[in-house]
Amino acid sequence: QVQLLESGGGLVQAGGSLRLSCAASGLTFGSYGMGWFRQAPGKEREFVAAITQIAITRYADSVKGRFTISRDNAKNTVSLIMNSLKPEDTAVYYCAARLTYTYVPATTTGLYDYWGQGTQVTVSS
């Protein structure tokens, strides 16, 4: 049974930083591309960042230069370091896994096979 468990969310002031982590189990982690998405109230889930099995990364324009995605294949974890947070970054953040044999970071929700339950990030102004 595949499980993705996010942690690290919380309340932070604008300009602050948070580190989200996602622990994966029940899958061959090295065969999966990983992604972070977010969903704000009343909005659709949107792409934030993705990383392939060989650490090729891609970011949404809105977070480029502020967020960094990384993975540790030995620990089956993927992380998202978020700096210079803005109130518009407030959302539930989801970790996702995609079984793929390509090395192209996926940016659409439909390409991912498994999802975590999400962790809330709130940025106050």
Image (cartoon, rainbow, N blue to C red):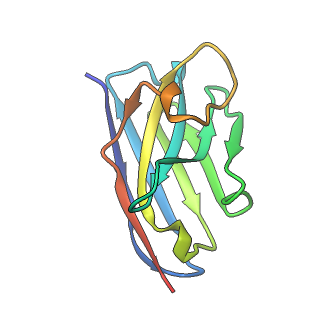
- The quadrant holding residue 114 is top left
Q: Position of residue 105 (x, y in %)?
A: 66, 31
**Place of residue 45 in the rendered image (x, y in percent of width and height, measured from the top left):** 47, 48
Task: Judge from the rendering whether residue 58 lies leftward or rightward of residue 41; answer left or right.
Answer: right
Q: Judge by depth and name the residue closer to the eye, 124 or 56.
A: 124
Q: Quadrant of the N terminus?
A: top left
Left or right of 94 in this view: 25: left
Q: Position of residue 7 (x, y in %)?
A: 36, 54
Q: Where does the image place residue 26, in percent across and percent down from the top left?
A: 31, 23
Nearer to the camera, 119 or 17: 119
Residue at x-position 57% and y-position 63% = 82
Which residue is at the far top? 101
Q: How many marks?
A: 0
Q: Residue furthest bottom?
A: 125
Q: What residue lies at 68% left-to-right and 60% top-to-bottom?
A: 62
- Considering depth in this image, is 45 or 17 the residue closer to the camera? 45
- Check the image and report above or below for 125 versus 95: below
Residue at the (49%, 28%) spot, across then down: 110
Residue 96 higher or lower than 67, as above or below: above
Question: Which residue is situated farthest in the front direction here?
Answer: 42
Q: Residue furthest left?
A: 1
Quarter of the image for residue 104 reads top right
Measured along the vertical axis of the image, is residue 89 above or below residue 68? below
